[in-house]
């Protein structure tokens, strides 16, 4: 029989890694943040098995770990600097100019809107799941998702002009 960690927490590692990449923009740092989060989850598995939303706890722990890494590195910069770092991709991946622009526009979104957009469009979560992950109500999630989509649409329309 699998432990709580093996059945509930370990399967989250890939999703947590994608979150870490969204926040940290660096593979090694993302892997370190996920490893720290998984370690904390392993140590707290008895507590996590008794709460309603252990996945939300893991995501929040990962976010705190990512913020700690950012603080330690002193990388609180402007969105332009963050956007430039975010566009660094492996040389074997060749994105078209339009795709690069879409990623730049996504990076210009406010942090909460970027997270919600990512959760919905990349992870495919429902409004209820996003609300649980982010400790928001469903109405707030819907409003932020609408605002993110509206801003992206505006960016794309203005880019074409």
Image (spheres, helix red, strand yellow):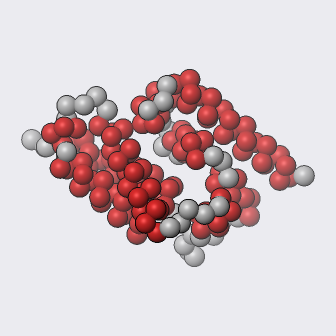
Q: Position of residue 102 (x, y in %)?
A: 69, 54
Where 83 sits versus 8, above or below?
Answer: below
Give whichever of 68, 101 is nearer the camera: 68
Q: Residue at x 90, y 52 (%)?
A: 161
The front one of 138 and 99 is: 138
Q: Position of residue 147 (x, y in %)?
A: 68, 35
| Residue sitting at the far right | 161
Q: Is residue 99 visible?
A: no
Q: Is residue 91 left or right of residue 41?
A: right
Q: Position of residue 126 (x, y in %)?
A: 49, 31
Determine whether 66 is above or below 56 in the image: below
| Picture layout, residue 15 above or below residue 96 | above
Residue ranking furthest to the left: 1
Q: Quadrant of residue 89?
A: bottom right
Q: Residue at the spot x=15%, y=39% of the render?
A: 46
Q: Residue at x 40, y 69 (%)?
A: 28
Q: Is residue 13 visible?
A: yes
Residue 25: x and y in percent read: 51, 63
The count of marks equals 0
When the figure is inspected, residue 87 is found, relative to residue 102, above or below; the finding is: below
**Which residue is rendered at x = 24% and y = 48% of the image?**
41
Relative horizontal placement of residue 144, taking residue 57 as reference (left or right): right
Quadrant location of the N terminus in the rendered image = top left
């Amino acid at each position: 029989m699998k432990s709580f960690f093996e059945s509930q927490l370990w399967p989250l590692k890939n999703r947590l890694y994608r979150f870490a990449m969204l926040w940290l923009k660096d593979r090694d740092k993302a892997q370190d943040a996920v490893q720290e989060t998984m370690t904390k989850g392993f140590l707290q598995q008895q507590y996590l098995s008794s709460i309603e939303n252990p996945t939300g706890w893991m995501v929040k722990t990962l976010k705190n770990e990512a913020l700690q890494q950012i603080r330690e590195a002193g990388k609180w910069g402007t969105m332009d600097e963050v956007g430039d770092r975010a566009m660094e991709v492996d040389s074997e991946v060749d994105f078209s100019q339009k795709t690069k622009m879409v990623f730049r526009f996504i990076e210009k979104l406010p942090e909460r809107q970027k997270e919600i957009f990512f959760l919905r469009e990349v992870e495919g979560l429902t409004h209820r799941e996003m609300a649980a992950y982010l400790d928001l109500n469903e109405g707030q999630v819907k409003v932020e998702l609408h605002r993110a989509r509206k801003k992206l649409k505006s960016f794309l329309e203005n880019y074409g002009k």
